[in-house]
Amino acid sequence: MASVSVAPSSGLVDASGINIGVDRLPDEMNEMKISDDKEVEATVVDGNGTETGHIIVTTIGGRNGQPKKTISYMAERVVGHGSFGVVFQVSLRAIRAK
């Protein structure tokens, strides 16, 4: 993760004529892009994906010489409905290195 400092505030004048300071990001921050460096493969092993009790198996890692890990967890209860669908509270079942 890159570390940068915030550029000094520049002076602006509001509608009433009062000088106000505005912080702005350094120019190098404008070039940054958001990326996901994780490779995730999720599989629902048991259930239809929208009910409690189903087991989900996910594989993560495997970059920069690191071994892949398989994580399995079980959906315990529904805690809400978010913009990406149903949100579950889960319990971890197992972690295995491949």
Image (tube, rainbow, N blue to C red):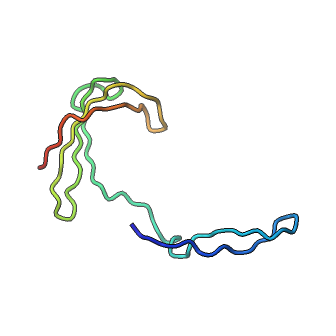
Quick check: 30 left or right of 41? Answer: right
Quick check: 48 left or right of 96? Answer: right
- Residue sitting at x 62%, y 70%: 24
| Nearest to the observer: residue 83 or residue 3 | 3
Q: Residue 2, relative to residue 86: is it above or below?
A: below
State which quadrant residue 78 falls in: top left
- Residue sitting at x 30%, y 55%: 38
Q: Residue furthest left?
A: 98
Where residue 87 appears, x then y in whole percent?
41, 32
Q: Residue 82, relative to residue 4: is it above or below?
A: above
- Residue sitting at x 32%, y 29%: 49
Quick check: 75 left or right of 19? Answer: left
Where residue 27 appears, x then y in whole percent?
55, 76
| Nearest to the observer: residue 46 or residue 91 | 91
- Residue sitting at x 25%, y 46%: 41
Where residue 91 appears, x then y in whole percent?
27, 32
Quarter containing the N terminus: bottom left
Where residue 69 appears, x then y in whole percent?
18, 49
State which quadrant residue 67 falls in: bottom left
